Image: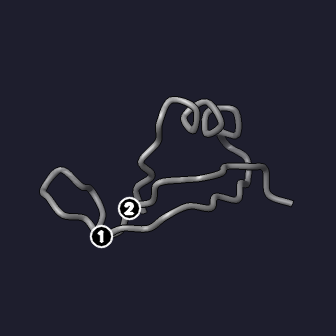
Amino acid sequence: MHLVLNPRMMESFKSLKGQPATITGSLFHADNGNHQTNVLMTPAQIRPAK
């Protein structure tokens, strides 16, 4: 799955690099050749996994 990150989500993602995380958000299908996977996610929240 490919994450589509805005600057705020990118900071959350970077702060949790190498750690388990829970990500919630909206899924959508790839619609052009630039997408690297068939399914992409626009995250609403990225937090450490419990």
Instruction: Determine whether 26 is above or below 11 in the image.
Output: below
| Cβ atoms at labels 2 and 1 below 8 Å apart | yes
Image spot of residue 39 (x, y percent): 35, 68
Label 1: element kind: strand
Left or right of 6 in this view: 47: right
Mark 2 sits on what residue? 40
Rendered view: 16 above or below 31: above
Q: Residue furthest right?
A: 50
Query: Is 30 above or below relative to 18?
Result: below
Residue at image x 70%, y 40%?
16
- As drawn, 13 above or below 26: above
Amino acid type, mark 1 = His
Instruction: Where is residue 36? Give x, y as percent.
Output: 26, 56
Quadrant where the C terminus is found in the figure: bottom right
Task: Give the amino acid type for the residue marked by disc 2 in the picture.
Answer: Leu
* Residue at the (14%, 58%) spot, across then down: 32
The residue identified by callout 1 is 29
Assess disc 1: are there few (<14), some (14-19) or many (≥20) residues with their C-alpha within 10 Å of its C-alpha: few
Q: Quadrant of the N terminus?
A: bottom left
Q: CA distance from mark 2 to mark 1?
A: 6 Å
Q: Is residue 21 left or right of residue 8?
A: right
Q: Position of residue 38 (x, y in %)?
A: 29, 69
Q: Is residue 50 left or right of residue 31?
A: right
Q: Residues within 10 Å of mark 2 (few under 14, many from 20)?
A: some
Where residue 15 sits, quadrant-wise, is top right
Q: Earlier in the sequence, mark 2 or mark 1?
A: 1
Tell me which residue sits at (73%, 54%) in the image.
20
Give 37 or 44, whichever is nearer the viewer.
Answer: 44
Dot 2 falls on a residue whose secondary structure is strand
Question: Residue placed at 61% from the left, 39% from the top?
Answer: 13
Q: How is the image coloured?
A: one colour
Which corner quadrant of the image does residue 12 belong to?
Answer: top right
